[in-house]
């Protein structure tokens, strides 16, 4: 897991693939960019979407304190003989993003709104798949992901006129639930490879017949 960078890419992937239509082009793609990238700005054409990280805060309502958690999605290097590990609960984090859409035609604007609110960032029950780590098994490469909450916090319409041309804008604020580990590992666990001890015999008083049971005593 790469904190923030993984969420950035996941949100961008979620917004990619939108298509709008008009009389001249029945399948015009909607570009998706991170906010204010100097090189990318020159390549932008309408309509397009920008993504900006606007706030990082602790999600205190999700705080848990324990040393017994084992998040499989963390890329932790453990000793060769170790079988497992535990770590403290990570710090829950809220990542707030502003998604801004830009279009020159009102029809494009409405189509983008419909696709965002109906499929990608709904008002309720939003979710996003965040790739945590890459697992290589033989010749196969697997992307291991977790499903995160994606909450819609608000929407604002910001239509304006720019250089004598209409500019249709929407601003969405969304929140991705994330987490930040405090330490890498609290404890390693190792498999038991050998058990040594002495054996003895005893007669449990709860048995009606003198069945002989074998007891292993570990010194």
Image (cartoon, rainbow, N blue to C red):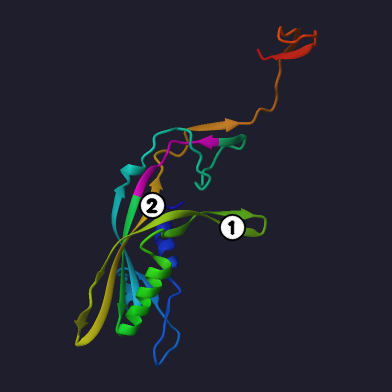
Name above or below for residue 134 compared with residue 99.
Answer: above
Q: Residues within 10 Å of mark 1 (few under 14, many from 20)?
A: few
Q: Is residue 90 magenta?
A: yes
- Residue at figure coordinates x 67%, y 55% from the top left: 138
Question: Quarter of the image holding residue 117?
Answer: bottom left
Where residue 34 appears, x then y in whole percent? 35, 68
Name above or below for residue 44 compared with residue 131.
Answer: below
Q: Which residue lies most toward the front here?
A: 208
Give the labeled residue for mark 1.
142
In three-dimensional space, the C-alpha distance between marks 1 and 2, rounded to whole angstroms, equals 23 Å
Q: Quadrant of the C terminus?
A: top right
Name above or below for residue 93 compared with residue 51.
Answer: above
Q: Looking at the rendered structure, which numbered label has been put on residue 206?
A: none
Residue 179 seen in render: yes
First reached walking from the N terminus: tag 1 or tag 2: 1
Q: Nearer the viewer, residue 41 or 13?
A: 13
Residue range highlighted in magenta: 85-93
Where residue 201 appears, x then y in whole percent? 76, 8
Say which element carries label 1: strand
Q: Nearer the viewer, residue 150 or 217?
A: 150
Q: Is residue 137 left or right of residue 97?
A: right
Mark 1 or mark 2, which is nearer to you? 2
Question: Quarter of the image holding residue 180?
Answer: top left
Q: Nearer the viewer, residue 135 or 106?
A: 106
Question: Quarter of the image holding residue 218?
Answer: top right
Tag count: 2
Q: Nearer the viewer, residue 195 or 159?
A: 159
- Residue at figure coordinates x 80%, y 11% from the top left: 211
Say which element carries label 2: strand
- Residue at figure coordinates x 71%, y 6% from the top left: 205
Q: Is residue 54 magenta?
A: no
Give the labeled residue for mark 2.
177
């Amino acid at each position: 897991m790469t904190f923030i960078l993984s969420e950035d890419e996941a949100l961008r992937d979620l917004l990619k693939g939108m298509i709008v239509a008009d009389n001249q082009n029945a399948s015009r793609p909607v570009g998706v960019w991170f906010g204010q990238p100097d090189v990318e700005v020159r390549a932008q054409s309408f309509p397009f979407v920008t993504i900006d990280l606007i706030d990082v805060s602790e999600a205190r309502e999700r705080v848990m304190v324990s040393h017994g958690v084992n998040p499989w999605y963390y890329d932790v290097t453990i000793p060769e003989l170790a079988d497992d590990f535990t770590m403290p609960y990570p710090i829950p984090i809220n990542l707030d993003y502003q998604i801004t859409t830009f279009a020159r035609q009102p029809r494009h604007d409405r189509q983008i709104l419909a696709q965002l609110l109906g499929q990608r960032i709904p008002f309720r029950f939003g979710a996003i798949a965040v790739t945590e780590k890459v697992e290589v098994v033989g010749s196969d490469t697997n992307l291991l992901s977790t499903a995160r909450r994606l909450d819609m916090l608000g929407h604002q319409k910001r239509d304006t006129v720019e250089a004598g041309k209409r500019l249709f804008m929407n601003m969405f604020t969304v929140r991705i639930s994330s987490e930040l580990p405090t330490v890498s590992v609290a404890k390693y666990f190792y498999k038991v490879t050998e058990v040594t001890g002495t054996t003895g015999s005893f007669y449990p008083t709860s048995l009606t017949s003198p069945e002989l049971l074998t007891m292993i005593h570990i010194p």
